[in-house]
Image: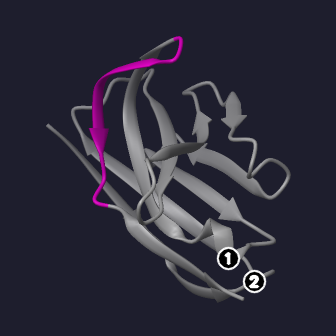
Amino acid sequence: QVQVVESGGGLVQAGGSLRLSCAASGSLFEDNAMAWYRQAPGEQRGLVATVTSGGSTTYGDSVKGRFTISRDNTKNTAYLQMNSLKPEDTAVYYCRVGRTYGSLWYSDYWGQGTQVTVSS
């Protein structure tokens, strides 16, 4: 079994920064990918950023140049540094850990989410 725990959410003013953390534990594959998704009220959950076990990253168009995903494999932890935050970044942010084949995920696990609220 795998546990995924997010932390670091909160309330911030527009233009500010937050850093989210995602700690994974349990029976993890060495080649797992880690990703951040977000879901605003009334909207579908969407991909924010992904980082592979080798450190390759991808980003959603709306966060490119503002957000940075990274990971520490020794701690099985991923981070999401969010800068220049906008009110439209307000959402619950979820971490996903698992194996990927192209864009497909399998043997994957989700965290419970952490709320990020950006005030204007």
The range drawn in magenta is 102-112
The main secondary structure of the magenta stretch is strand
Total marks shown come to: 2
Which residue matches tag 1? 87
Relative to 38, is 114 above or below? below
Residue 83 left/right relative to 5: right
Q: Are marks 1 and 2 in contact (CB under 8 Å)?
A: yes
Which mark is first along the chain, 2 or 1? 2
Residue 107 left/right relative to 95: left
Numbered disc 1: secondary structure:
helix
**Residue 117 location in percent, x, y?**
55, 80
Q: Look at label 1 and name its amino acid.
A: Pro
In the picture, the disc for residue 60 is none
Quadrant containing the N terminus is top left
Taking depth in this image into account, of 64 and 119 the one nearest to the observer is 119
**Residue 98 location in percent, x, y?**
36, 29
Residue 51 left/right relative to 16: left
Residue positioned 74% across, 72% down in the render:
85
Taking depth in this image into account, of 56 and 62 the one nearest to the observer is 62
**Residue 96 location in percent, x, y?**
39, 41
In the picture, the disc for residue 14 is 2
Of discs 1 and 2, which sits in the foreground?
A: 1
Label 1: how many Cα within 10 Å (few below 14, some 14–19, many 20+): some
Q: Look at label 2 and name its amino acid.
A: Ala
Taking depth in this image into account, of 11 and 76 the one nearest to the observer is 11
Residue positioned 66% across, 31% down in the render:
55
Numbered disc 2: secondary structure:
loop
Taking depth in this image into account, of 63 and 99 the one nearest to the observer is 63
Quadrant containing the C terminus is bottom right
Relative to 59, is 78 above or below? below
